[in-house]
Amino acid sequence: MASPDQPGLIWLFFGWSGRLSRLPYALAWGFWMALAAAFLTRMVMTPHDEPAFVTWTLLFFAVGVVSTVSSVMLTIKRLHDMALPAPLVLCLFVPAISIFALIAFMVWPGTPGPNAHGLVPDRPKA
C-alpha cells in the first residue's frame, strides 16, 4: 500500500491530478508498449484455428484499451508538470504529429519548482 509520501501505481497509471516527470512518464509508456508487444507476439505466433488465438486477441485488445486510458492519464500529468494545458493530450491522437508530441513530452523539461498542479513532480496534487 502506498504511503502519502510515496504515491502508488494506481495513481501513476490512472490518476490525473498532480505532476509527472520525464523518467516515470517514459518508463510507464515503455511498460505499456512492452505488454502490448508481448500479447501481439503471442497472438501472431498462435495459429488462427486454435482456441488460444481468440484468447490472445482479446487480451491484446483489452491491453490496448487499458493502455490508451492510462496513456491519456500519464500525459495529462506530464502536461501538468510542463505547465501546459491538458487538452494538448489530443496531440497523441493526431497521426501526423503523435510521434513528435510523444517525444516532446518525454524530453521537454518540467516546470522547476511549484506550479498550479503541485509542489513537486511525481506526486498527486496535495
Image (spheres, rainbow, N blue to C red):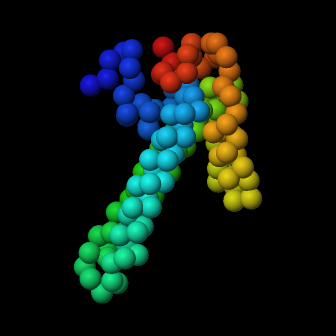
| Foreground residue among 114 and 90 | 114
Q: Quadrant of residue 108?
A: top right
Where's the N terminus, which quadrant?
Answer: top left
Q: Is residue 69 visible?
A: no
Residue drawn at x 26%, y 75% is 52
Residue drawn at x 45%, y 50% is 32
Residue found farthest to the bottom: 49
| Foreground residue among 109 and 101 | 109
Residue drawn at x 57%, y 13% is 119
| In the image: residue 67, left or right of residue 84 | left
Residue found farthest to the right: 96
- Residue 19, x across and y down, in percent: 56, 25
- Residue 26, x across and y down, in percent: 55, 40
- Residue 4, x across and y down, in percent: 36, 15
Q: Is residue 51 visible?
A: yes
| In the image: residue 6, left or right of residue 69 | left
- Residue 50, x across and y down, in percent: 26, 82
Q: Quadrant of residue 63?
A: bottom left
Q: Is residue 68 above or below residue 105?
A: below
